Amino acid sequence: MTVEAAIPTEDQLAEAGLRLRVAGGVATITLARPERRNAMTGRTWTVLAHVGQTLPASVRIVVIKGEGPSFSSGIDLAMFGPDGVEGEPSLMGYLGAGPGGEAALEAAIAGYQEGFLWLRRPGIVSIAAVRGHAIGAGFQLALACDLRVLADDARLCMKEPALGLVPDLTGTKPLVDIVGLSRAIELCLTARSVSASEARDLRLAELVVDGADLDRAVDDLVAALLATPPEAAAATKALLQQAVGSDPAEQAARERRAQVARLTALARQGAPGASG
Ligand code: CAA
C-alpha cells in the first residue's frame, strides 16, 4: 500500500512565508511576507518543493503571486549573515563548519532548486503573476514558471552578480532560452532593472497589463488553459520543451509517437471520428 505524502500544513506554509489555495484544478501559491517584500529563505524553497511533490493530481495550473507591492525582493539577505534567519542555518555557516561544508552547502542548494524545478513539469502550466519588484531569486522564480503575466509596474532584476554571486536557482537556462545569450549576459552583468514594457519586448512577459487588471488577466488566462483537454496539454507541453535545441528529424519522430498515443487514447474513449 502506498501512502500519499501530505501537503504542507498551514503552519509549515506560514513559517516559509507562503500561502496555498487549491480549487478547481488551480493551485495558487502566494508569497506572503509583504513586510519584507516577500523575501524568501531556504525554507521557502524546500516547502515549495514539498508543495510540488504533494499537489493533488487534479491540479493543472499553478499560479504564483506576491502579496503587497512586490512579487519578491529575492533571497532574505539575513541568509548571508552569521546567524542566518530564525530556525535556518546561514549559508556562510555551512562553510565555517569544517570539512564537508562545501558539499553540505551544495546539497542545500540542490534542495532549494527543487522548489523551482517542478514548476516546469508537463502535467501543469505554471504562471507567475508579477507586480512590482522581482529581484534575484524572485526573478528566478518568475523564470521557473512557464508563463509570466506582468503588471505595468513590474521591475525584473538579476541582482546576484552585483552581490558577488551567481544566479543559482535554475534561472540561467530559461533566461538564456528566452532572451538569448548576449542579452542575458548584459542583463546579469549590469544587474539592471528591466521594466514591464521592456520585458514584453524581450519576451520575458507573455502579457503586460494595468496593475488593477492583473488578477483578472491571470484568471482569463487560467480559464483559457483549463479549456484544453489535460492529456493533450501535458503531451504538447512535453513536446514543446523537447523541441528546444532538438534535431528536426528526432523531434518529428517525437511528434509522431505522441500523436499515435493521443489518437490511441481518443479511440479508446470512443471519441467522435475515432472509430475502429
Ligand atoms: N531580505 C531581507 N529583508 C528585505 C529584503 C531582502 N531581500 N528586501 C526588503 N527587505 C526589507 C527591508 O529591509 C525593509 O525592512 P524594514 O521595514 O525593517 O526597514 C522592508 O523589507 C521593506 O523594504 P524597503 O523599505 O526597502 O521597500 P521598498 O519598496 O522601498 O524597496 C526593494 C523594495 C526594491 C525590493 C528593496 O527592499 C531592495 O532592494 N531589497 C533588497 C533586494 C536584494 O538585494 N535581494 C537579494 C537579491 S540576490 C538573490 O535573491 C539570490 C541570491 O543571492 C542567491
Image (cartoon, helix red, strand yellow):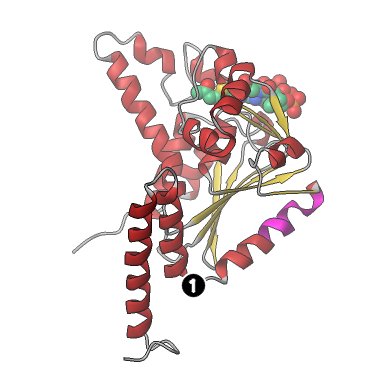
Residue 225 % position (x, y): 58, 64
Instruction: Give above or below for 233 relative to 167.
Output: below
Q: Is the residue marked by circle 1 packed among few (<14), some (14-19), or many (20+) residues within 10 Å?
A: few
- Work out whether residue 216 or residue 125 is closer to the camera in this orientation and state it: 125
Furthest toward the front, the residue is 249
| Residue wearing tag 1 | 229
Q: Is residue 65 left or right of residue 83?
A: right
Residue 100 visible in the current orientation? yes
- Seen in the picture, residue 14 relative to 161 is either above or below; the reply is below
The stretch drawn in magenta includes residue 232: no
Where is residue 89, by image quadrant? top left
Does ligand 1 reach within 8 Å of label 1's beta carbon?
A: no
Give the quadrant of the N terminus.
Answer: bottom left
- Depth check: 140 or 22 in front? 140
Q: Picture coordinates of residue 200 (x, y %)? A: 71, 42
Q: Quadrant of residue 28?
A: bottom right
Task: State whether the magenta stretch is mostly helix, strand or loop.
Answer: helix
Residue at position x 30%, y 14% in the image = 101
Q: Is residue 75 visible?
A: no
- Assign ligand 1 to one image quadrant: top right
Residue 217 magenta-drawn?
yes
Q: Which residues are magenta?
A: 212-219
Q: Is residue 73 left or right of residue 239?
A: right
State the residue in front, 36 or 152.
152
Q: Residue at x 49, y 62 (%)?
A: 60
**Amino acid at pointer 1:** Pro
Q: Position of residue 66 (x, y in %)?
A: 64, 42
